[in-house]
Image (spheres, grey):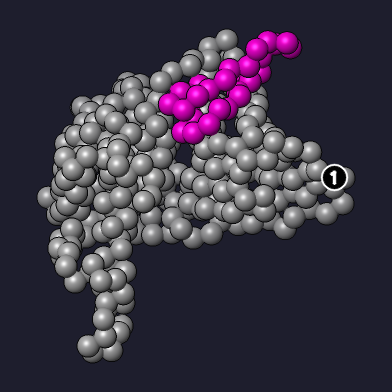
Amino acid sequence: MTRAQTDIDAETSEAAIAWLVRLQGETVTEGDWLAFDAWLTASPTHAQAYDDALAFDQGLDLDARFAEAAPAGAPLSTPLAANVVPLRPARRVWMWSAGAAIAAAFVAGAVLVPSKGLIGGRETTYVTGVGERRAIALEDGSRIDMNAASRVTVRFERHARRIKMDDGQVFFDVAKDSSRPFLIAAGDTQVRVVGTQFDVRRRDGQVAVNVQRGLVEVRPNLASGATPFRLKPGQGLSHHEGRAADAKLQAVAVEEIAGWRQGRLIYRDQPLSQIAGDMNRLFPRPVKLGDAEVANMRLSGVLIVDEQDAMVDRLSHLLPVKTTTTEDAIVIRAR
């Protein structure tokens, strides 16, 4: 039996299946996604049940492809496949939609040739462009997921694994190695772990670290000798670079940390200027804000990543704004 399946009751499993069907339907609304986000974050077992339902549904897709490719009369790849009812409608609507600008999301970003002649280590820089995402397996068994418009430099040394993070957002799944700590430099912030899962975002002069699993030590340019923050699962720390005294420790829903990797941009009282910046890293056509009033508007909610025009249209329903679209840009102004 796989991970903690006995902890998921029948009612939760049925709810997860219902959400899967509802969110893949053609009539899904923003309200549906907000309600789903609330349900998903209400309990860790909800996320586990939904992952199980999604994995089973994807398994049905695989069985269907095998059946189409198999000779007539050949058995399906699993004896259960003939006795189950597919969870999906005829037309699938994915959480990460196949919008034209996002179709490049899984295209590999540029990888610079490892530097030579370094004393005690090898260095490689990974880059993703606008609209690109990339998953990278490192030589120590760790994995990093890079969001669009991100840049990180990886250097493995004998006694340490070092990451330099420029502007970007990266989810780290660090392989445990107590003899070589995993050290991340993100602007004025130092992050130290041995083996864990967490997200680091450095955008527009702000740094945020959110922990999904394990223990993460964060030092936002603290005075010499000051005790660093130690974050547990479900905790996050954010601050403006150069203002370590403003660092705020806060609770973060563990499931939200994976939001951007699943095509969901989740905001908790964030300014529209940040949202526009995120969209500009996803699409080549820029989103511009008409004035300071609209830039300071704040949003709490979930934006599904699909077509750019559709995302901007949703904003006009969530906030008192109007949009003007040209060939060169989308301009958002207060109504």
Relative to 246, residue 210 above or below = below
Q: Residue at x 52, y 37 (%)?
A: 197
Q: Residue at x 23, y 69 (%)?
A: 81
Pick the residue in front: 122 or 10: 10
**Residue 213 counted in the magenta span:** yes
Q: Quadrant of residue 165?
A: top right
Q: Is residue 322 visible?
A: no
Pick out the residue farthest to the bottom: 72
Segment colored magenta: 210-237
- Residue at image point 63% right, 40% down: 176
User: Where is 154 relative to 193, above or below?
Assistant: below
Q: Is residue 296 visible?
A: yes
Residue 93 at what x, y percent from top left?
Answer: 23, 56
Q: Name the residue located 68 percent from the left edge and 10 percent from the top edge.
A: 226
Identify residue for label 1.
120
- The residue lying toward the viewer, choosing from 324 and 108, is 108
Q: Is residue 223 left or right of residue 29?
A: right
Compared with 177, 115 (above or below) is below
Q: How many marks?
A: 1
**As drawn, is 152 to the left or to the right of 98?**
right
Relative height, residue 112 to residue 78 (above, below): above
- Where residue 146 appears, as percent x and y from the top left, is 52, 46
- SS under mark 1: loop
Residue 101 spot, x, y in % from top left: 38, 56
> How many C-alpha atoms fall within 10 Å of the one at disc 1: few (<14), some, or many (≥20)?
few
Residue nearest the viewer, comparing 186 with 230: 230
Q: Quadrant of the C terminus?
A: top left
Q: Mark 1 belongs to which amino acid?
A: Gly
Q: Position of residue 159 (x, y in %)?
A: 79, 38
Residue 15 on the magenta span: no
Instruction: Between residue 291 and residue 222, name the one nearer to us.
Output: 222
